[in-house]
């Protein structure tokens, strides 16, 4: 069940705590000059479901180009502390530190109602995930990314733990703040002198937009229809609705009442989405790449694999570079909710990949992939495989020993249903 905060009557609110924190958050927003939400003529509203999912949906029809929300930047946490915190820290850690500093103010923080609705446990691979999923990811690209991210955070925490910057916040608090930053921050391009820089910021309300986008494989350059319907821009005071520097959210296409507002977060590979956002996006645009007919679809994939095997056989066990122009179009996969990125790592390498379009196939690997794809238990992969483009192997064999030794299917949280 979805509950739209703007229609929640105070009587209903008294009867249930469902949505109460969001109601407090919304009152804080309107009291602090945010435009576009919380009034009768607003076209967008916060919603929450019983399971705790939140997002923004349009409550009235919206025309393309229409501005929906105007949020003054002063309400957010904008990374302004490079001098104070030093160049030594990564940008993401600097913002995390500023979030912890704000949180340590407790109820006296001006941003308290917003901090109250930040997730206590961030549902991302880096944040917190069910233990069995971590186990299932052993040896995968995502696991490797996760362990690098954890190491990086530990190194960053070591730099600040004995300073006064984060008071008595623990390493777990720091990791929470990092995962909030990764899943909710915005990066705004700017200039410092002649240098291009980016300014990271956490922004209330805009951080409630869920993702839908135009995913791009990098490996195969299919054009596809963008599925997001809003964008954000930074607006100067002289042109803004709030009279301040603001973040304005506007519709990039007409949106009907009842539809979610969707923002495209990025075109990062699925493993990065999983790491930072806790889900893997739909990549439905790739469906058109494969024939709908099951038999033809399998035929296509097996032709691609045969081509890969051929290349591997000629190469023996050494990586071989082959022009893949004529073969790349054969390897395309449809969207779904299941993923095995070890398998995908192998496929990516078989089909070429990276900007140079090379084969890195070995015979053993080609055979293994074929076995996996054609065994009955894995037929769903033909329908459900996601494209993970960062999955190229390291030169020394990378993830492949794990792939050859064992193979574990895992089901990942998928993007919200259409
Ligand atoms: C910027 S927040 C968006 C607001 C968030 N839904 C909330 O309740 O606070 C990003 C998080 O929302 C969730 N999310 C966003 N888009 C999603 C999608 N398309 N499918 C599944 N989860 C999504 C993920 O948990 C992600 O880490």
Image (spheres, rainbow, N blue to C red):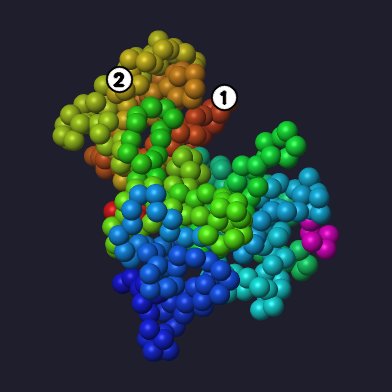
What is the number of the mark on residue 135?
Answer: none
C-alpha distance separating marks 2 and 1:
23 Å
The correct choice, above or below, for 118 with respect to 351 in the image is below
What is the number of the mark on residue 306?
Answer: 2
Query: Secondary structure under badge 2?
Result: helix
Q: Please say whether residue 161 is one of the residues in the magenta stretch.
A: yes
Disc 2 crowd, CA 10 A, few/some/many (<14, 14-19, 20+): some
Is mark 2 in CB contact (under 8 Å) with mark 1?
Answer: no
Quarter in which the N terminus is drawn: bottom left
Disc 1 crowd, CA 10 A, few/some/many (<14, 14-19, 20+): few
Magenta-colored segment: predominant secondary structure: loop
* Residue under the image location 81 percent in, 50 percent down: 83
Q: Is residue 150 left or right of residue 337?
A: right
Q: Nearer the viewer, residue 277 or 245?
A: 245
Query: Secondary structure under badge 1?
Result: loop
Q: Which residue is mark 1?
A: 395
The correct choice, above or below, for 242 with respect to 345 in the image is below
Q: Please say whether residue 187 is one of the residues in the magenta stretch.
A: no
* Residue under the image location 33 percent in, 70 percent down: 2
- Numbered circles on residues, count: 2
Across and down, in percent, residue 392 comes to 49, 29
* Residue under the image location 41 percent in, 35 percent down: 216
Q: Is residue 174 visible?
A: no
Which image quarter: residue 173?
Answer: bottom right
* Residue under the image location 41 percent in, 33 percent down: 217
Which is more N-terminal, label 1 or label 2? 2
């Amino acid at each position: 069940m979805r509950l739209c905060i703007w229609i929640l009557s105070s009587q209903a609110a008294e009867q249930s705590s469902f949505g109460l924190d969001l109601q407090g958050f919304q009152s804080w927003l309107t009291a602090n000059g945010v435009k576009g939400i919380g009034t009768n003529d607003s076209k967008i509203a916060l919603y929450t479901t019983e399971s705790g999912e939140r997002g923004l949906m349009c409550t009235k029809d919206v025309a393309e180009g229409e501005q929906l929300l105007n949020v003054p930047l002063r309400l957010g946490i904008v990374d302004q502390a490079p001098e104070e915190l030093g160049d030594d820290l990564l940008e993401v850690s600097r913002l995390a530190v500023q979030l912890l500093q704000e949180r340590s103010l407790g109820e006296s923080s001006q941003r308290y109602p917003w901090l109250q609705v930040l997730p206590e446990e961030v549902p991302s691979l880096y944040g917190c995930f069910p233990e069995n999923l971590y186990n299932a990811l052993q040896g995968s690209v995502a696991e490797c990314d996760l362990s690098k991210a954890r190491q990086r955070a530990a190194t960053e925490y070591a730099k600040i733990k004995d300073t006064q910057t984060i008071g008595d916040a623990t390493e777990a608090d720091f990791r929470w703040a990092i995962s909030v930053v990764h899943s909710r921050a915005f990066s705004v391009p700017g200039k410092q002198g002649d240098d291009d820089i980016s300014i990271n910021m956490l922004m209330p309300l805009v951080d409630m937009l869920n993702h839908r986008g135009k995913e791009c494989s990098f490996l195969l350059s299919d054009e596809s229809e963008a599925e997001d319907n809003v964008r954000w821009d930074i607006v100067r005071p002289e042109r803004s609705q709030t009279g301040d520097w603001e973040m304005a959210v506007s519709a990039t296409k007409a949106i009907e009442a009842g539809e979610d507002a969707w923002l495209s977060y990025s075109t990062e590979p699925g493993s990065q989405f999983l790491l930072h956002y806790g889900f893997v996006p739909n990549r439905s645009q790739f469906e058109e790449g494969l024939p709908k007919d099951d038999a033809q679809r399998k035929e296509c994939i097996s032709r691609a694999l045969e081509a890969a095997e051929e290349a591997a056989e000629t190469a023996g066990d050494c990586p071989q570079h082959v022009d893949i122009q004529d073969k790349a179009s054969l390897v395309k996969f449809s969207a779904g909710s299941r993923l095995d990125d070890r398998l995908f790592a192998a496929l990516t390498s078989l089909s070429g990949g990276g900007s140079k379009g090379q084969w890195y196939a070995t015979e053993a690997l080609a055979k293994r992939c074929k076995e996996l794809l054609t065994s009955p238990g894995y037929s769903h992969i033909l329908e459900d495989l996601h494209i993970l483009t960062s999955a190229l192997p390291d030169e020394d064999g990378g993830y492949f020993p794990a792939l050859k030794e064992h193979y574990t299917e895992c089901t990942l949280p998928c993007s919200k249903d259409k």
